[in-house]
Amino acid sequence: MNKSMESLFCLPAPLAASHKGQNGVVLIIGGSKTYHGAPILAALAARHFCDLVYFSSTDENNKIIKRMKIATPNVICLPPSLRKKYLAKADCILIGNGMDVNSKTKRLVGAVLKMKKKCVLDASALRVLSPSLLHEKAILTPHSLEFRAAFGAPPSEKSAAKMSEKCRCTILLKGREDILASQGKIIHITGGNAGMTKGGTGDVLAGLLCALYSQNDSPASAAYTAAYLNKRAGERLFERLGYYFSSEELAEELPFAANALYKGFKKPF
């Protein structure tokens, strides 16, 4: 990491006198009958980097709630009747992972954006997006096809810069080299390896980003830190396992990568 990038890298550290809930509260909204694993992977990553992780799915997805509870006891699963209350309570909201592309998802994404709160839009949320609702606290994490679906433009550095400025949002365009566009400015984030092409690694990144953003008022800083840290975790796994690691292992490697990076700096972030 060069000196110019160090100012963007920011790992939160809880104050000694803080208590539960003061170091990030996130709400993950996701899942469908077909894609139950996506929000679980996001939650597995998020739980390491914030105090509280809440999860909500659609009315018919009771099976996802059960699977989430089995996957980790660190996530608080909510019935849809309580979603409004915890939308207001959350410091940051992640929406879209594993959701169906339909009118219900579109309405829910729109409702989240209209709150003007810190939020991360991933996966299906990007395919039903109304760009006119975007704001300066929104972070989008598209791959190339999702970028085209969201903006009707080619997935390029130029397009990312243009759309981030036009829509006043932050865009993390995922690829072999991630492109971070915030208010028209561009930063490239290199690293990782081909083992990170596996399904679910994007969900891990989204969960990590949501947790970091819940404690950081700079969307560019949160997005840069999440992308950089995710790639470093993938590189650490490659040293031990080559290309043969899973998305779950990536989520579990994140705190080790974070701790190594934290110790590498002379002062707290």
Image (tube, grey):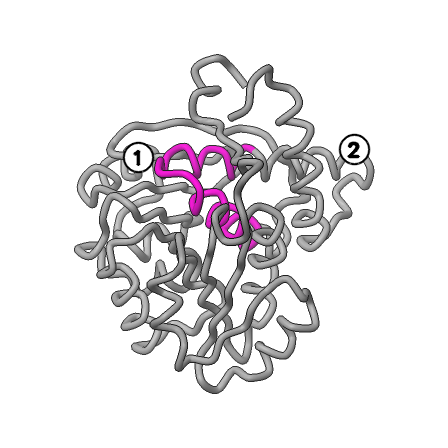
Q: Which residue is mark 1?
A: 182
Q: Residue furthest right?
A: 240
- Side of 226 where 73 appears, left or right: right
Q: Which residue is mark 2?
A: 239
Residue situated in front as seen by the camera: 265 or 198: 265
- Side of 41 where 157 appears, left or right: left
- Side of 110 where 222 appears, left or right: right
Neighbor class of circle 1 (other Cα within 10 Å; few <14, some 14-19, many 20+) is many
Q: Residue furthest front?
A: 17
For the N terminus, give its image quadrant.
Answer: top right
- Give coordinates of residue 84: x percent, y percent: 34, 72
- Magenta part of the protein: which range? 203-228
- Side of 269 where 41 appears, left or right: right
Residue situated in front as seen by the camera: 208 or 15: 15
Main secondary structure found in the magenta portion: helix
- Give coordinates of residue 240: x percent, y percent: 82, 37
